[in-house]
Amino acid sequence: MGERPSLFFPDVRRYLLVEEGEQIVDEVVKHPVCMIVPLFFVLVGILTMLAAPLAHQFWLLVVIIGAVVGLIGLWKLHSRSMDRFVITNMRVYRVNGIINRHVATMPLTRILDISVYQSLVGMALNYGHFTFESAALDQGLRKITFVGDPKRRDLTIQRVIQRAGIRAMAQAKDEPDGS
């Protein structure tokens, strides 16, 4: 308690319900493939600044443009490194944001369906995108993109739900009473 949030790594443990026995089962960082475009921006920014002397009288403008493009790339890199998806024994949640933190939570009892989408590139590089369907109409945790090893992570969520006995409780509620 009293810990300051890190500017470089999100502290996902601070959102745990420790008193209720919540434990992290898996913490998911974005797949490295989502870093390609921001790295490209950084590279273009650096190359633009290095080429500035060739622009003669407009060299300062070229340096400013290169710096802006490079900074946009660095911002996007940092933003993606601060995005975490967490699976616990009680819920799933996502923590993201650099200046302002956003936390979206979904209890395991609310998960009705999980769809996993993998493109051809995603299958080759072993990443995919999750879509959560829940009983809530307006949900803060719907789509999680660039999840590495999505099949294993989907099975992890399914196992946690089974171990918690949530599906059995939901089925028992839906079945009519035999008495």
Image (spheres, grey):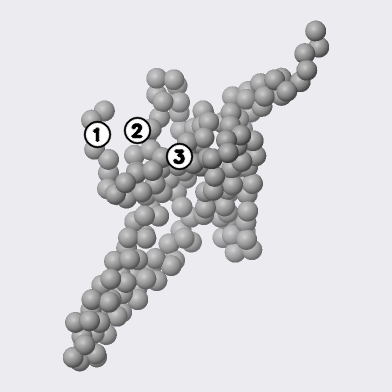
Residue 1 located left or right of residue 15? left
Amino acid type indicated by mark 3:
Ala
Name the side, left or right, on which 65 lies relative to 159.
left
Q: At numbered mark 1, what does the secondary structure look like: helix, strand or loop?
A: loop
Q: Nearer the viewer, residue 125 or 85?
A: 85
Nearer the observer, disc 2 or disc 3? 3
Asked if residue 31 shows in the view, the reply is: yes
Tell me the SS state at disc 2: helix
Residue bearing mark 2: 14
The residue that appears at 81% across and 12% down in the rendered structure is: 178
Q: Which mark is residue 104?
A: 3
Verify CB contact (< 8 Å) between mark 1 and mark 2. yes
Question: Which amino acid type is shown beneath numbered disc 2?
Answer: Arg
The residue that appears at 37% across and 60% down in the rendered structure is 76
Instruction: Please tell me whether mark 3 sits on a helix, a strand or a loop.
Output: strand
Q: Which residue matches tag 1?
A: 3
Q: Pinpoint residue 159: horizontal percent, then vertical percent.
A: 61, 33
Which numbered disc, 1 or 2, marks the residue that appears first in the sequence?
Answer: 1
Q: What x and y, as percent, mark residue 41?
A: 37, 71
Residue 26 can be seen in this image: no
Residue 93, relative to residue 117: is it above or below? above
